[in-house]
Image (spheres, rainbow, N blue to C red):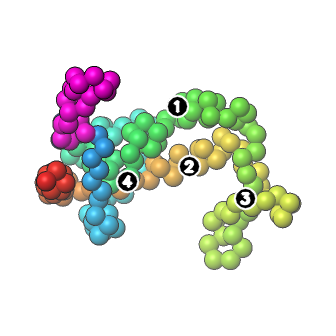
Amino acid sequence: MYFNSIFPKIKYDPTGNGNAIEIQDILTRIVTRKNVATRNVLFSKHAVTDSETPESLSLEYYGTIKHYWVNLMINKYYDRYYDWPLTERNLQKYVVNKYAVPSSIHHYEISQESGDTEIKIQVEVVDYPSATPITNMEHERYLNDERKNIKVLKKVYIEPFISEFNSLLKEQLL
């Protein structure tokens, strides 16, 4: 994978017997500059569908799969398998594995009473007897749906972004 090839290699002795091996230093961390991450002109909004992967999105926007990591990084999706939106099928499996009873109540919600009444507020049912119960499945589906709305770096900025990323990576090694 391209993403792994850009990280530096380090010597690591997993058993402590003096036989070090060379591995990728996956703990090297570069974060997107705040002023870049908040400049909406650099990005397109994208709603991820069930069939899309980071690689397919990279191919669609940049013509290659090797830049898949850029949009994961920009959206702060550090775990490619659980931060990226799950397909409906994988979401079902995830919820069944996470909760003993997926249909049990996770929490209760009410609509905000002033301002944007579309905003839901989590409450204790004893304080608001008319609150709507939200099941574990509904809660996880909401979280997954929120992750579907991502920012995609516009193609014109991909090469400068990668160039700066590589420069920052080199600086960190010095």
Q: Mark 1 points at which residue?
A: 90
x, y percentage for residue 49?
A: 43, 42
The answer to whether 17 appears left or right of 113 in the picture is left
Q: Which residue lies furthest to the bottom in this view?
A: 114
Q: Mark 3 points at which residue?
A: 109
Q: Name the residue under label 2.
A: 143
Span shown in magenta: 7-25
Q: Residues within 10 Å of mark 4 (few under 14, many from 20)?
A: some
Q: Identify the residue shown where x is 43% and y is 36%.
A: 81
Q: Residue 75 carries which label?
A: 4
Q: Is residue 9 magenta?
A: yes
Mark 2 or 4 closer to N-term? 4
- Specify whether residue 92 is in view: no
Q: Quadrant of residue 83?
A: top left
- Tag 2: amino acid: Leu
The answer to whether 174 appears left or right of 48 in the picture is left
What SS does tag 3 mark? Answer: strand
Mark 1 or 3 closer to N-term? 1
